[in-house]
Amino acid sequence: MSITSTLPRAALLSATEPAAFEIVNPHGTNNLVLVCDHAANRVPECLTALGLSAAQLADHIGWDPGAAAVARLLAKILDAPLLLSGYSRLVIDCNRPIASNELIPEQSAGIIIPGNQHLSPQQREQRIQELFIPYHNAIDELLDERLLSNPQQPAIFLSIHSFTPFLFNQQRPWHIGVSHKSDDHFAKHLHSGLVQQGDIVVGFNQPYAIEDEFDYSIPTHGEARNLPSAMLEIRQDGLITETGIERWAERIAQAYGTYAPNL
């Protein structure tokens, strides 16, 4: 056994780097709990940008552009708590099961991720322990606090994402999609509220359905707790400007506010 193998492992994050997650408005009065699994495109300094360019990390492979900005505004409008992941989905994807091959992707959209090639089990486990688990523990703790403070009114769980306008050179027609897993009650309310706004195309389990093989947050924090749960996917070409971001936050808040009393 080498001498170095017995020494403490260096932390993935330095003392000056942001934490694995950020919590916004933790004491918000709304029983809605918001999460944003792909909120950031940050990479720990020790991973040297995973060998990617700044432009590649800023693209959709690195995060969900615009999703965090919408989630922050929504938290403010509705006075709801919000949990955001702190690092790029290419470092570790906080909405993938730990057993998934996509948890730490070796390639994304045809782009090889140099810093994710040939990881040792220890390197993989370090990312899980320092980034993935703290984020999800924070969500659990927030939901536990909500349950203790108001056991008669369980939390409502909503995950905010964004998606590319084109996939495999095919235009995706939906401006926003509402997805659910087993329980579609909350998702149907949100979908109806968005459709009634009249000027947008709203997908239902489009562009993505929620599946145990590919999704983690809704199955783990929503369905496992029997909470009303849904995932929103907003098309990224509507999130380029501040005006677009504000408009989507207002649209979602309107849909939620109209139907929340019926949940």
Image (tube, rainbow, N blue to C red):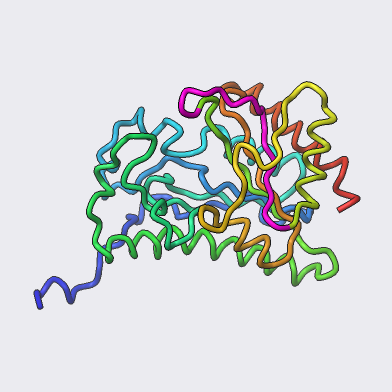
Q: Residue furthest right?
A: 262
On-image quarter of the N terminus: bottom left
Q: Position of residue 153 (x, y in %)?
A: 83, 64
Residue bounds of the magenta highlight: 167-182
Magenta stretch: includes residue 229:
no
Q: Position of residue 162 (x, y in %)?
A: 57, 36
Q: Kindly identify the residue that appears in the image at 43 percent across and 50 percent down.
A: 18
Q: In the figure, 247 relative to 222: above or below? A: above
Magenta stretch: includes residue 181:
yes
Relative side of 112 to 75, left or right: left
Q: Position of residue 218 (x, y in %)?
A: 63, 56
Q: Kindly identify the residue that appears in the image at 75 percent across and 47 percent down.
A: 187
Relative side of 129 to 258, left or right: left
| Front residue of 24 and 64 | 64
Q: In the figure, 258 relative to 56: above or below? A: below
The quarter of the picture where residue 143 lies is: bottom right
| Front residue of 5 and 26 | 5
The quarter of the picture where residue 149 lies is: bottom right
Q: Residue furthest left?
A: 2
Q: Position of residue 101 (x, y in %)?
A: 38, 54
Q: Kindly identify the residue that appears in the image at 90 percent across and 51 percent down.
A: 262
Relative side of 191 to 161, left or right: right
The quarter of the picture where residue 132 lies is: bottom left
